[in-house]
């Protein structure tokens, strides 16, 4: 596993403050760099990790898992539940089909989410247009008992 600190970057921000919106790092030691919060990133297969690999369970999990063949997003969502501490909250962007597909795995996933008191909010059409997709999505919110 590789861990690196990417605190010089903040997605969606004009990083060097010159107003051109370019994706460039700010100069080391600059005022803009020193105001950034540090974060560690882990390069690994999430589905192969457990809470112990990341230092324990979490109070909050926020995710936009990959969508794709084999309903990989559902595997990620179900795996995320195991990372929540008691009372922990989860927010995830999921395909809107989570609400209506009737295959066994989707139905079982919805039942699991219902056990956790999940609620769904439909995201606006085109919410991810700038990311290159017109996928219809929902936000799933729940709190671990």
Image (tube, rainbow, N blue to C red):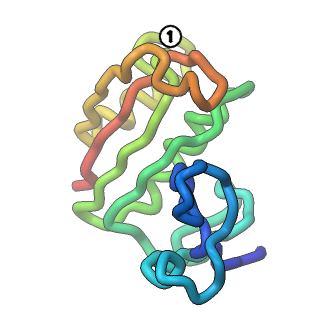
Q: Nearer the viewer, residue 55 or 33?
A: 33
Q: Residue at x 62, y 31 (%)?
A: 131
Q: Quadrant of residue 69?
A: top right
Q: Is residue 16 left or right of residue 24?
A: left
Q: Position of residue 108 (x, y in %)?
A: 46, 28
Q: Nearer the viewer, residue 71 or 115?
A: 71
Q: Is residue 107 visible?
A: no
Q: Residue at x 65, y 52 (%)?
A: 22
Considering the numbered disc 1 on the image, is that residue within a helix, a strand or a loop? loop
30 vs 7: above or below: below
Q: Is residue 40 left or right of residue 100?
A: right
Q: Residue at x 29, y 32 (%)?
A: 114
Quarter placement of the C terminus: bottom left
Q: Is residue 88 left or right of residue 39?
A: left
Quarter placement of the N terminus: bottom right
- Count numbered badges in the picture: 1
Residue that mark 1 sits on: 102
Q: Position of residue 6 (x, y in %)?
A: 64, 73
104 vs 41: above or below: above
Q: What crowding class fits label 1: few (fewer than 14 Cα within 10 Å), some (14-19), or many (20 or more)?
A: few
59 vs 77: above or below: below
Q: Residue furthest bottom?
A: 29
Q: Position of residue 105 (x, y in %)?
A: 56, 25
Q: Position of residue 11 (x, y in %)?
A: 56, 54
Q: Residue at x 42, y 52 (%)?
A: 62
Q: Quadrant of residue 141?
A: top left
133 vs 5: above or below: above
């Amino acid at each position: 596993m590789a861990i690196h600190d990417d605190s010089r970057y903040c997605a969606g921000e004009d990083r060097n403050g010159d107003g051109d919106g370019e994706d460039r790092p700010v100069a080391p030691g600059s005022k803009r760099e020193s105001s950034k919060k540090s974060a560690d990133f882990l390069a690994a297969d999430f589905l192969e990790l457990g809470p112990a690999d990341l230092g324990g369970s979490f109070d909050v999990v926020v995710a936009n898992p990959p969508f794709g063949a084999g309903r990989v997003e559902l595997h990620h969502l179900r795996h995320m539940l195991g990372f929540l501490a008691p009372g922990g909250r989860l927010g995830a962007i999921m395909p809107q089909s989570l609400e209506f597909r009737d295959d066994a795995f989707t139905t079982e996933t919805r039942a699991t989410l219902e056990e956790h008191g999940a609620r769904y909010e439909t995201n606006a059409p085109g919410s991810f247009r700038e990311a290159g997709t017109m996928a219809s999505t929902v936000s799933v919110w729940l709190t671990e008992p």
